[in-house]
Image: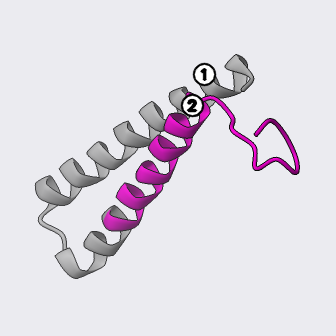
């Protein structure tokens, strides 16, 4: 996998984690209605999970199925 792409995805994941952390802190500090912010925070955590999974897959060697690459 292209190292430049992996590096960009890693940087994006770090920035996204920072945004989620800020969103949580703001929700706690502002005493906002939890029913409005919890779904937003949960979606952010899910997206961060997708980014982390992508980074993990980028670090693994590619193993084809015999039809489109090495078997």
Say if the magenta span includes residue 4. no
Horizontal side, residue 53 vs residue 29: left or right? right
- x and y percentages locating residue 68 in the rendered image: 88, 47
Secondary structure category for the residue under label 1: helix
The residue sitting at 49% across, 52% down in the picture is: 50
Q: Which residue is mark 2?
A: 60
Q: Left of 70 or right of it: where is 10?
A: left
> Where in the figure is residue 16, as x and y percent of width and height?
45, 42
Find residue 62 and report its image quarter: top right
Q: Residue at x 52, y 29 (%)?
A: 10
Name the outermost residue toward the top.
Answer: 3
Residue 48 magenta:
yes
Name the residue rendered at 18%, 75% in the picture. Answer: 34
The quarter in which the C terminus is drawn is: top right
- Residue 52 on image: x %, y %: 45, 42
Residue plotted at (56% across, 43% down): 54
Residue 1 vertical placement versus 47 (above, below): above
Q: Would you call the spot at circle 2 few (<14 residues within 10 Å), some (14-19), or many (20 or more)? A: few
The residue stretch that appears in magenta: 42-71
The residue to which callout 1 is attached is 7
């Amino acid at each position: 996998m292209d190292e430049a792409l992996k590096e960009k995805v890693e940087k994006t994941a770090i920035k996204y984690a920072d945004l989620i952390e800020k969103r949580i802190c703001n929700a706690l500090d502002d005493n906002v209605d939890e029913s409005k912010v919890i779904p937003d925070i949960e979606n952010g955590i899910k997206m961060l999970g997708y980014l982390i999974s992508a980074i993990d897959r980028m670090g693994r060697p590619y193993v084809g199925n015999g039809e489109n690459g090495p078997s």
